[in-house]
Amino acid sequence: MNESVAVVFGGSSGIGLATAERFAAEGATVVVASRRGGSVRLGNGTSIDVLTCDVSDEDQVRSVIDHVSHEHGRLDILINSAGVTKFVDFADLDGIDVADWRSIIDVNVIGAWNTVKAATHLLEESDEGLVINVASSAGIRVAGSSLPYSVSKAALIQLTRTLARALGPRGIRVNAVAPGFVETPWTSDYRERGLEVAHIAPLQRVGTPADVADVAMSLVQARYVTGEIVLVDGGLALVD
């Protein structure tokens, strides 16, 4: 991967940051974009600037892709890890309003569409054009932090499949990872659920961001795989 260029949207923390670190460790040039901007320090000690980008804004996304094109002249791997949620029980219909739906769908679904649309012209010039969407097991099972979040991840999974069909003839693969319960800043207040998952999941532990990053890396090597959704849940879906 020494000549590959990867951009990670939502790469300033959690799964996105771990994925950026993993790809950088393999020799890729990594560009990180996040709504928060700032800078991040990768596992190898390298500090990199984070481009400020709200993926629901087409102009901001296009600006990031233009930056990648201008600075690096190519783009090989696009990783969509940006996501938002609201923690509300599924049965609490009054706890969710239309604004919540719009903000979650705008980032989790339309955001991924925006990045792929903006980057397609660069990805099709690459010998390894690849999109990796970070979905969730909540998009497969009836689970997750809220009803709109679960629906948004189901939509992202279908977007992954339809884009794989549309872009395959242009030499671009599109796959997704679907994590289960992963230790991230999002889940830090849900220790009891984490202990429950560790007890019932066949692998007897919760996931880490590095676990998801490892699967994302494996998709780089799987050059005849597209339109696939890879569960990364320690086998929880088998029993829960």
Image: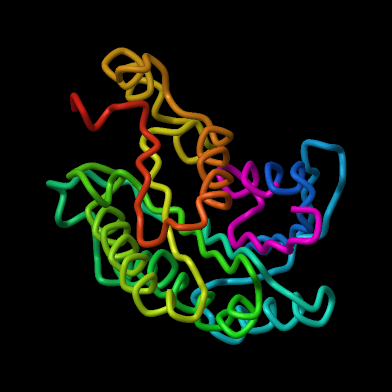
Dividing the picture into quarters, in which one does residue 168 lie? bottom left
- Quarter of the figure that contains the C terminus: top left
Residue 3 colored in magenta in the image: yes
Residue 207 shown left or right of residue 29 in the figure: left
The residue positioned 22% from the left and 53% from the top of the image is: 147
Dividing the picture into quarters, in which one does residue 166 lie? bottom left
- Report x, y in % for residue 63: 69, 82
Segment colored magenta: 1-20
Please determine whether, in this image, residue 103 is positioned above or below residue 21: below
The residue positioned 31% from the left and 60% from the top of the image is: 157
Please determine whether, in this image, residue 72 is positioned above or below residue 48: below
Residue 25 colored in magenta in the image: no
Please determine whether, in this image, residue 180 is positioned above or below residue 220: above
- Report x, y in % for residue 111: 47, 72
Can you name the residue that lies furthest to the right here?
Answer: 46
Which one is in front, 190 or 33? 33
Which one is in front, 20 or 167? 167
How many numbered circles are shown? 0
The residue positioned 40% from the left and 41% from the top of the image is: 179
The residue positioned 52% from the left and 75% from the top of the image is: 171
- Report x, y in % for residue 22: 68, 42
Dividing the picture into quarters, in which one does residue 95 lie? bottom left
- Report x, y in % for residue 71: 84, 76
Residue 226 shown left or right of residue 197 in the figure: right
Please determine whether, in this image, residue 150 is positioned above or below residue 188: below
